[in-house]
């Protein structure tokens, strides 16, 4: 019975880490080309302190814990790129956006840790 519980917990965490269906990944190198596109909305889901320390100027800071309450201020039809420090929180943000019917969501692989800009 204990093994079943352990497998259930592992399965739950593995499921939570999977990318949301329909969310594409983008490398930091490919992101550089997207930054010039004014029709794309960019969201940084890190805390205000992390954002203040280092950020990409095109990204708007909407911390993950406030994202759901700020969805009305975003355009669901626009391509939306999300970033965090490592890609974990932005992956969660991408799931939130997809559940809220955003059509084109991209998650930056490696996040700001991988950014060399």
Image: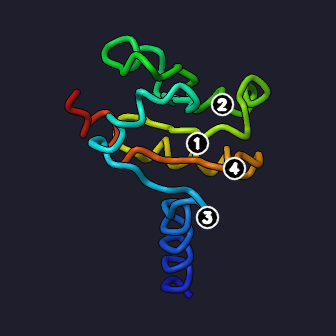
Query: Counting residues from the N terminus, which is met first, the one under dot 3 or under dot 4?
Result: 3
* Label 2 residue SS: loop
* Label 3 residue SS: loop
Residue closer to the observer: 39 or 63: 39
Task: Give how far apart the Cα atoms at labels 2 and 1 are.
Answer: 7 Å
Task: Give how far apart the Cα atoms at labels 3 and 4 are.
Answer: 11 Å
Q: Mark 1 = which residue?
A: 93
Q: Residue at x 61, y 64 (%)?
A: 21
Query: Counting residues from the N terminus, which is met first, the one under dot 1 or under dot 3?
Result: 3
Whether residue 10 is situated above or below residue 92 in the rendered picture? below
Residue 30: mark in rendering: none
Residue 67: mark in rendering: 2
For the residues carrying marks 3 and 2, which lies nearer the camera in this image? 3
Query: Mark 2 and 1 residues: CB-CB less than 8 Å, in contact?
Result: yes
Q: Residue at x 71, y 45 (%)?
A: 102
Q: Residue 60's x, y, as percent?
A: 53, 20
For the residues carrying marks 3 and 4, which lies nearer the camera in this image? 4
For the residues carrying marks 2 and 4, which lies nearer the camera in this image? 4
Q: Mark 3 = which residue?
A: 21
The residue positioned farthest toward the top in the image shown? 52
Query: Mark 4 and 1 residues: CB-CB less than 8 Å, in contact?
Result: no
Query: Counting residues from the N terminus, which is met first, the one under dot 3 or under dot 2?
Result: 3
Q: Mark 4 = which residue?
A: 103
Q: Is residue 5 left or right of residue 98?
A: left
* Label 4 residue SS: loop
């Amino acid at each position: 019975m204990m093994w079943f519980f352990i497998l259930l917990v592992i399965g739950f965490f593995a499921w939570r880490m999977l990318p949301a269906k329909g969310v594409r990944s983008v490398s930091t190198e490919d992101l550089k080309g997207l930054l010039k596109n004014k029709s794309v909305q960019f969201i940084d889901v890190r805390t205000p302190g992390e954002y203040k320390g280092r950020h990409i100027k095109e990204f708007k800071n909407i911390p993950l814990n406030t994202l759901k309450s700020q969805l009305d201020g975003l355009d669901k039809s626009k391509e939306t790129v999300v970033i965090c420090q490592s890609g974990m929180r932005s992956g969660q943000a991408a799931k939130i956006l997809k559940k809220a019917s955003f059509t084109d969501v991209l998650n930056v692989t490696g996040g700001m840790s991988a950014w060399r800009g």
